[in-house]
Every structure is written in C-alpha cells, then in structure tokens.
Image (spheres, helix red, strand yellow):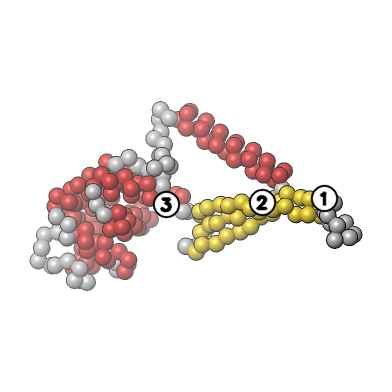
Amino acid sequence: MPIPESSREPLEKFFHYSPERIRVLTAALTKTKPRFRIENFAQDVTKKAQIDSSEFSELLTTLTGMYLAIEQSGIDIEDFLQAVVDEMIGDKLIEVDQNWEVPKKALFEIFATPNAFVISAKAVDIMTAHQRQFTTVRTFTDLRPIYGPDVSKRPVAALILHKLQVNYLENGESKQIFFALDRHDLLKFQDVLERALQKGQTLQSTLKDSVMFLEDQP
C-alpha cells in the first residue's frame, strides 16, 4: 500500500514517539470533544496533549486521510494498518527488527471506535463532499452618479450599489465569483440567512436530547 509523500514524515514521527507520548496523544484524539471544524479540533488536541501545533497539523491530516481511506474502501482496519507497517518497513521509515505494536494498537484505537477523532473526521468528509466549498465572503459598496446631458454639471441622481465577493474552493483550487446587488437584494439575502439560522436553531432545540451537535466555534 503506497504511502503518500505528504504522509511519510508524520507517520515516521508517530511510530518513533515514546509509548507515553503515544498514550497521551491517543487519549487526546479520542476523548477531546468532537468539533464541526477540524482546525478547532486540532487546537483542542494540541492543548490537551501539549504537542507542537504545526507537527500535529501534519499528523492530523495524515490520520484523517487514513481513516477516510478505510471508510471508503471497506478494508479491515487490522489489515490496513499491517499494510501500512509493511510499507513503512519496506521504505525504511521504520526498522524491521523492532516491535511496532504500541503505535499500531494506538492507531487501531483511534480508527475503530466512534470517538472524538472519528466523529470530527466524518464531519470533515461530509462538509467537503461537494463540488465547491465556501471559504470567505466580502462586500463592497459604491456610489454611482447619474449625469444629465451636460456631464460638466453635478449629477442629477445617484445609485448605491453593492458587490458581493464569494471565495470558494473547487478541486482544491481557490476561486472567487462576484455579484452586483442593490438594497432589495441585500434584504432578500438577510431574510434567507435569518430563516436558515432559525431552522438550525429549531432542529437543535428539538433534537438536543437525542443527538450530539458539534460545536463550530473555538
């Protein structure tokens, strides 16, 4: 099973962690509160496990990719992890004559149960299962004068126009699209967004006793 280039270093570091560090990191990954946004989950885990944030960010990306590969392929977790260990030994990322049961068992624990990591990883998969993913939005407001036949004289009227800039990801590439809006358009946006927020609040209050809702704020 080929290991992606971006995952080789994070996995090599993880397999060479001390047993105690692996235990602490596994506990943080599985017992920290699940998050709607993976970056918030990463912040919680790094704080709890006292691990370098940049190093953990690479590892979390690798673990998320591994878990989703297991989910989508339907392969047995034990078989998947053994294939990873064999590939790492073949690539000389880890030594063949050492016992790698501690990191291997830790990965099994991380992937095999519906814990905080698994729930957060599934949330990422659901959120990105679209052709385009929204990232940010901006608005720009302009005053557009309207002149009469003699443009040397003051404008006879004016319009207030707005430009909406929506930034998004498509196939991993950052893109943007612009819309011209007037006040009536903004009011329609406001009404639609307020309705969406209200519907979300209604669902959450109705199902709060039977479903765990993920927080989307730090």
Looking at the picture, how far across and down is residue 66, in whole percent? 32, 57
Q: In percent of the image, x 51 and y 32: which residue is there?
A: 201
Query: Cα distance, mark 2 to mark 1?
Result: 17 Å
Q: Mark 2 points at which residue?
A: 141
Residue 194 vs residue 110, the one in the foreground: 194
To which quarter of the image does residue 69 belong?
bottom left
Classify mark 2: helix, strand or loop: strand
Q: In percent of the image, x 40 and y 28: which residue is there?
A: 209
The numbered mark at residue 125 is 3
Q: In percent of the image, x 17 and y 51: which residue is there?
A: 21
Residue 114 vs residue 39, the one in the foreground: 39
* Badge nearest the viewer, 1 or 3: 1
Farthest residue, direction front: 153
Query: Cα distance, mark 1 to mark 3?
Result: 51 Å
Q: In this view, does 72 lie to the left or right of 30?
A: right
Kind of residue at disc 1: Ala
Say whether marks 2 and 1 touch (CB < 8 Å): no
Kind of residue at disc 2: Thr
Q: In the figure, 160 relative to 33: above or below?
A: below
Q: In the figure, 92 relative to 202: above or below?
A: below
| Residue 63 in sight here | no
Looking at the picture, how far across and down is residue 182, in whole percent? 71, 48
Classify mark 3: helix, strand or loop: helix
To which quarter of the image does residue 1 belong?
bottom left
| Residue 3 in sight here | yes
Q: In the figure, 204 relative to 115: above or below?
A: above
Say whether marks 3 and 2 touch (CB < 8 Å): no
The numbered mark at residue 157 is 1
Q: In this view, does 135 lie to the left or right of 121?
A: right
Kind of residue at disc 3: Asp
Farthest residue, direction right: 149
